[in-house]
Image (cartoon, rainbow, N blue to C red):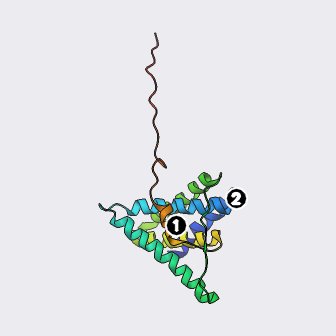
Amino acid sequence: MRQMVQSILDTAVLTASRRADNADIASAIIAALRRLRALADVEPGGAGAATFDDAVRALVLRRGLREAGRTGQAPAHVPIPAPGPQTAFASIVLEDAALTCLALRAFAPACALLVQTTAGLIDALVEVLGGIPDPAALLDRLQPRRGIGTAAWTPLPNLSLQ
């Protein structure tokens, strides 16, 4: 199942890279992680979100430790770029891929798919950024943003046909 999840995510990154640069793709990966965090946050009191945040922190630290073991020194954190003009396109592709991975739950437990998808997105983020992001900065970007993803309705004035 892990190979299938990774294949879906790799294909999504490749598709997004046709129209978006690495900064846009990194922002889109963060948007997909934010979507997964929202799905995990179904428990009252935010227990699901806290567990998801802990998993993201652990995955980023694991990548950092792997890099430190390979090079012999602690990796410097790379900055997380601001969203660019093609972030919306890349976000649609990557969020859809992440949700597709979760839809495979007929073949594996949903929790395992959430962990595998999150790990795959963190790995893709590290590759796109070319290094390890600061875990605190990443977790800050995963917090829900007011006004993002919510429709703003403007009432129309009363129109009369007379």
- In the rendered image, residue 65, in percent from the top left (x then y), is placed at 54, 84
Q: Is residue 131 above or below residue 40?
A: below
Classify residue 112 by image quadrant: bottom left
Return the residue found at the far top: 162
How far apart in space, not on screen, are marks 2 and 1 (Cα)? 27 Å
Q: Is residue 160 above or below residue 74?
A: above
Q: Secondary structure at mark 1?
A: helix
**45 and 25: which one is in front?**
45
Please give the name of the residue rendered at 45% of the width and 15% of the height, measured from the top-left corner: 160
Number of numbered discs = 2
Q: Nearer the viewer, mark 2 or mark 1?
A: 1
**75 and 55: which one is in front?**
75
- Residues packed near mark 1 inside 10 Å, few (<14), some (14 to 19) or many (20 plus): few
Residue 109 in view of the camera: no
Which numbered dot is residue 12?
none
- Residues packed near mark 2 inside 10 Å, few (<14), some (14 to 19) or many (20 plus): few
Give the residue number, with chain letter if any, for mark 1: 137
The tag earlier along the polypeptide, 2 or 1, is 2
- In the rendered image, residue 90, in percent from the top left (x then y), is placed at 61, 56
Indicate left or right for 112 with 79 as reference.
Answer: left
- In the rendered image, residue 103, in percent from the top left (x then y), is placed at 45, 63
**152 and 82: which one is in front?**
82
Residue type beneath disc 2:
Arg
Residue type beneath disc 1:
Ala
- In the rendered image, residue 94, in percent from the top left (x then y), is placed at 56, 60
Q: Are marks 2 and 1 in contact (CB under 8 Å)?
A: no
Please give the name of the residue rendered at 61% of the width and 58% of the height, measured from the top-left corner: 82
Residue 135 in view of the camera: yes
**92 and 69: which one is in front?**
69
Q: Secondary structure at mark 2?
A: loop
Give the residue number, with chain letter if any, for mark 2: 18
Q: Is residue 103 above or below residue 149?
A: below
